[in-house]
Image (cartoon, helix red, strand yellow):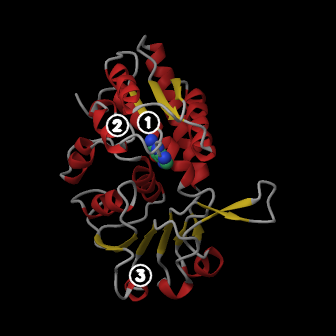
Amino acid sequence: MELIDGKKISLEIKAEIAIEVENIKKAGGKVPHLAAILVGHDGGSETYVANKVKSCEEVGFKSSLIRFEDNVTEKELLAKVHELNNDNDIDGFIVQLPLPKQINEQAVIEAIDSSKDVDGFHPVNVGRTVIGLPSFISATPFGIIELLKRYKIEISGKHCVVLGRSNIVGRPISILLSQKGSYGDATVTVLHSRSKNLEQICASADIIIAALGQPEFVKANMVKQGAVVIDVGTTRVKSELTKSGFKLTGDVKFDEVAPKCSFITPVPGGVGPMTIVSLLRNTLLAAKKEIYK
Ligand code: GUN
């Protein structure tokens, strides 16, 4: 069994991005600039956004954090989105989710200029991904594909089971893995809460992508000997063993599943660290106008 070290790979990618930024600067080019809109003071969102801003600094990007209080109106938020769309200094931006209930999240996502949508949530980017056009791919699926590539895990012709069908992870990763070409060509089964024979189908998979958000859902009996297991789960479960009072728990019962695997991602330190570097990669692509030329 080999552990897939997302932390190590993410540091390698950050170093690669930092070199690119240096080269852009040396050539007199514009430093990539990512902006993030954060509404309210949710603890999880604050941490995510702080990490995104910190990561920008680490690779030499410019970053801007724009804050609104919880009672912001949809009109005010949309006005800021339009302002960022038209700001030539901003290469890409994100609106951290979730948003307060008075705001229609989908309307905000759709207001973002798709050429600046480095989260890859805009329907234009999702649609372009589906038909294999260059697009911003959302951070988690982008990160998973990169981990598979860097560990040279063959996926062509393999049976991949994706557990979960969310817009952000399950749906896009199932599309990417089944696409024609490099890091595609897999036979993909998407399993979800209404699936029958879920355990049996899982146990026939060469590769399992667990993205349900249900702690320790995948048990040893659901995993074939030699399978590759990618755990996307990051649920905060109460724990007396940690200072913070909670433990980040994956969708896979790691201790019993790991011995059966050829490769497995840990939680934390697997897929998680890859998501932020994927956002940085998208920002670099946006700055270089490599998706929308
Ligand atoms: N909330 C949780 N994950 C994400 C993400 O990747 N992007 C945004 N914008 N909000 C999130």
Q: Position of residue 31 (x, y in %)?
A: 46, 19
Q: Is residue 213 above or below residue 90?
A: below
The verdict on label 1 being within 8 Å of ligand 1 is yes
Q: As rendered, which of 72 and 32 lies closer to the eye?
A: 72
Name the residue: 40% across, 54% down: 141
Q: As rendered, which of 119 and 21 lies closer to the eye?
A: 119
Q: Position of residue 74 (x, y in %)?
A: 38, 33
Q: Amino acid at mark 3?
A: Cys
Q: Is residue 244 above or below residue 48?
A: below
Q: Please name which of the two marks, 3 or 2, marks the residue nearer to the observer.
A: 2
Q: Where does label 1 land, which residue? A: 95
**Which mark is first along the chain, 2 or 3?**
2
Residue 151 visible in the displayed image: yes
Residue 53 found in image quarter: top right
Tag 1 and tag 3, C-beta contact below 8 Å: no
Q: Where does label 3 land, which residue? A: 202
Q: Secondary structure at mark 1?
A: strand
Q: Secondary structure at mark 3?
A: helix
Tag 2 and tag 1, C-beta contact below 8 Å: yes
Q: Find the distance from the CA under tag 1 to the CA under tag 3.
A: 35 Å
Tag 3 and tag 2, C-beta contact below 8 Å: no
**Which mark is first along the chain, 3 or 1?**
1
Residue 108, numbered label: 2
Q: Secondary structure at mark 2?
A: helix
Q: As rendered, which of 130 and 73 lies closer to the eye?
A: 73
Density class for disc 1 (Cα within 10 Å; few <14, some 14-19, many ≥20) is many
Q: Please name which of the two marks, 2 or 1, marks the residue nearer to the observer.
A: 2
Residue 183 visible in the displayed image: no
